[in-house]
Amino acid sequence: MTDLPDRAIALCNSADLADSGLAVAFDVAYAGQTCRAFAIRYRGTPHAYLNRCTHVAMEMDYQPDRFFDDTGQWLLCATHGAAYLPSTGQCAGGPCRGGLVKIALSESDGVVHWHTAYNLQPVEF
């Protein structure tokens, strides 16, 4: 497989991501498929993952852009209750296998950017 160069793509304004709040959704091409992904802010730092539970490959949000539990400490899969650490995407409990697919983010000048990689590309419409 050939590595493609990393690109930074503007995702949202920094203010769009509140700590343990609503996510910002976006589409990526991953393993030859179009997949939903989401960005959140946790303890001041933005993080992004594929919106795909490791227990069963289905989207996790229980309402659009809602991934955090009531305490704001865990990312939950609405279908089977798998819990993930917001800072790493690692499985923290419930029926999950491994961790979520992490997407690299950076933040500068009030904008959050996501970074492409050989297996994660923007969806071209």
Image (spheres, helix red, strand yellow):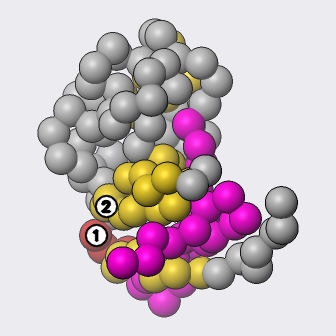
Asked if the residue at tag 1 contacts the one at tag 2, i.e. Cβ–Cβ closer than 8 Å, the answer is: yes
Considering every residue shown, the one lying at the far left of the view is 63
- In the rendered view, would you say 124 is above or below 121? below
In the rendered structure, which segment of residues is drawn in magenta? 100-125
Q: Quick check: can you spot residue 8?
A: yes
Disc 2 marks a residue whose amino acid type is Val
Of the numbered discs 2 and 1, the one sitting upstream in the chain is 1
In the rendered image, which residue does mark 1 sit on? 16
Identify the secondary structure beneath mark 2: strand
Q: Quick check: can you spot residue 46?
A: no
Q: Nearer the viewer, residue 59 or 44?
A: 59
- In the rendered view, would you say 33 is above or below 61? below
Q: Position of residue 11 (x, y in %)?
A: 41, 75
Considering every residue shown, the one lying at the far top of the view is 94
- In the rendered view, would you say 42 is above or below 45? above
Considering every residue shown, the one lying at the far right of the view is 2
Identify the secondary structure beneath mark 1: helix
Q: Position of residue 125 (x, y in %)?
A: 36, 78
User: Which of the two discs, 2 and 1, sits closer to the camera?
Assistant: 2
Which residue shows up at 59% across the image and 43% down it? 101
Whether residue 3 appears in magenta in the rendering, the answer is no
Disc 1 marks a residue whose amino acid type is Asp
Numbered mark located on residue 8 in the image: none
Numbered mark located on residue 24 in the image: 2
Which residue shows up at 57% across the image and 68% down it? 121
- Determine which quarter of the picture holds residue 100: top right
Which residue shows up at 45% across the image and 70% down it? 123
- Determine which quarter of the picture holds residue 66: top left
Q: Position of residue 99 (x, y in %)?
A: 60, 31
Instruction: Give the spatial CA distance, label 2 vs label 1.
Output: 8 Å
- Determine which quarter of the picture holds residue 41: bottom left
- In the rendered view, would you say 87 is above or below 14? above
